[in-house]
Amino acid sequence: MAGVKRAFRYCLVAFLSAVTLSKRGSSSTPRAGLSYEDTIINKVLESYKMRTIYSRPVLNVTDSMTVQFAVQLTQIMGLNEQDQVLTLNIWDQIRWRDDQISWDRRANGDVKDVRIPCENIWTPDIKLHNYADLRLKEHRDALCIISHDGEVYHVPQVVYRSSCLIDVYVFPFDVQNCTLKFGSWTYNYDQLDLQFYENKSWIDLTEYIESSSWSVNNVPAYRHVKQYTSTSNWSRVELQYHLIFQRRSALYNYILILPCILLTTITLVLFFIPPESPAKMQLGLAIFIAFFVLLRLLEKNLPPGASQMPLLGTYYCLNMILITLSSFLNVLIVDLTTHGQRTTTPPKIRKFFFNYLARCLRMNDLVKPFVTVTPKSRTPKEDLGKIEEKTWTHEVDRSNEALFALQRDPTQCAGPMAEIEHKLGELREFMRQQKVRLDERDKKESIAKQWKAVALILDRIFFFVYLIIIFASLSYTLPVLTWSNTNYNTSLVRIARGI
């Protein structure tokens, strides 16, 4: 019974205020010193003094009030990847109907509408649900436009800061999809029905200022009625505006992509430098440091603790791993080159590397001396030494016979022949030792060359492995990165731009 009385009292007050406003509005002449517009504004303010600014302007408390809402984007002010916050400059467009305000235009100097501060009348409490703002106020004060038929139009200037999940997998060619969720904070679906303003199911871009960092791909909007389980029979209307935009990557092509391609090309030069050269190790370390610097530049533009590593960063790490393996292989090659001075090449290794791998890698000229065993040719001078050696050997027999004859005949031991025979013996011994040393040196050099050939074959194998890995990674990375993700409804963007 008490509720019925309160409802009757509320309807009576609303009726009396509407009658009072209509009667006063019927006067064709305003009070002295006041214009028609002043008179209407005073009547509206007096009406709200009677019914307060906290109740919905409906005739019946059970009526559902329809509020139209739209978002007009003017500028993308920035996207903070570190904090995952999107900052937008927006004009809100809000329209509703005040059933307790109206006047006759013809009787009031043809005044179509008046402007009144919004804090003096009722306004819908439409809030950004996924806000990420530390400020206490996000709207700039703007007057409300009240028409003669009771329509109220409000266009506040707003700087929204909303949370946005950042996807950096294809950075710097990434496409972000940020959602703005608007709805009444206290009124349920039965009390406040939120609809699109003039059926604009998109973000209005007629006043949009092009961003130097982002290009807008699509701006769809959807209306949802959400049921909240925390409160029984509590459902609210939520308008979701999706801003899909892509990063302009022209600058990043020069500071991240081009240096990466150049460093990858320089890395291939590492395999053409002789393994024993110190420049190979120095160049490898320099390229490693360069990729690390690029990785640091990439890290500055990424949110901390990203759920997945950017594809470009993975490519950087892959190159750093390959360069590290190349440095270890270079040390192994140098060790193998010097290893030949200690032990010989195992026959199985020699056969596998020289007969199979060298043939597959087109390195037959390198291993030809070790595969085809031919008598080692000497220079004519060396051949002459062999001939002389045989000659001296033949003469040795004769000299020995002469020596025995001289020993039997002591009278013949003295003289120049004995001295000549002594000198020839020393010369033959010297030549024999020299031949042994040369053969030993040739053997060591041959073993060292065999180990060096094994090392060069390993270096060539790793070169082809690196080449295959780089081409495979580039064939996957570049198409994924450069895929522009433009498969969107571009007609909706043209409509939103008013084209």
Image: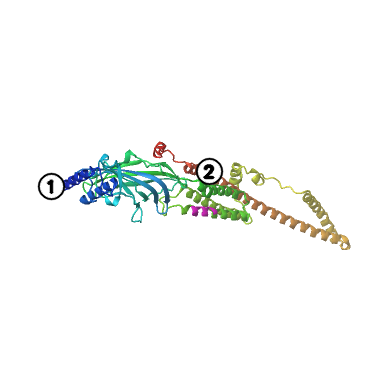
The amino acid pointed to by label 2 is: Phe
What SS does tag 2 mark?
A: helix
Circles 2 and 1 in contact, beta carbons < 8 Å: no
Question: Where residue 238 sits: x, y (%)?
Answer: 30, 45
- Camera-side residue: 134 or 305? 134
| Label 1 neighbour load within 10 Å: few <14, some 14-19, many 20+ | few
Which stretch did the figure color magenta?
A: 290-297
- Camera-side residue: 34 or 226? 34
Q: Residue at x 35, y 41 (%)?
A: 221
Q: Residue at x 79, y 60 (%)?
A: 426
The residue to which callout 2 is attached is: 471
Front of the two marks 2 and 1? 1
What SS does tag 1 mark?
A: helix
Q: Main secondary structure of the magenta part?
A: helix
Badge number at residue 159: none
The residue to which callout 1 is attached is: 4
Residue extending farthest front: 32
The amino acid pointed to by label 1 is: Val
Residue extending farthest left: 1
- Is residue 22 among the parts visible in the rendering? yes
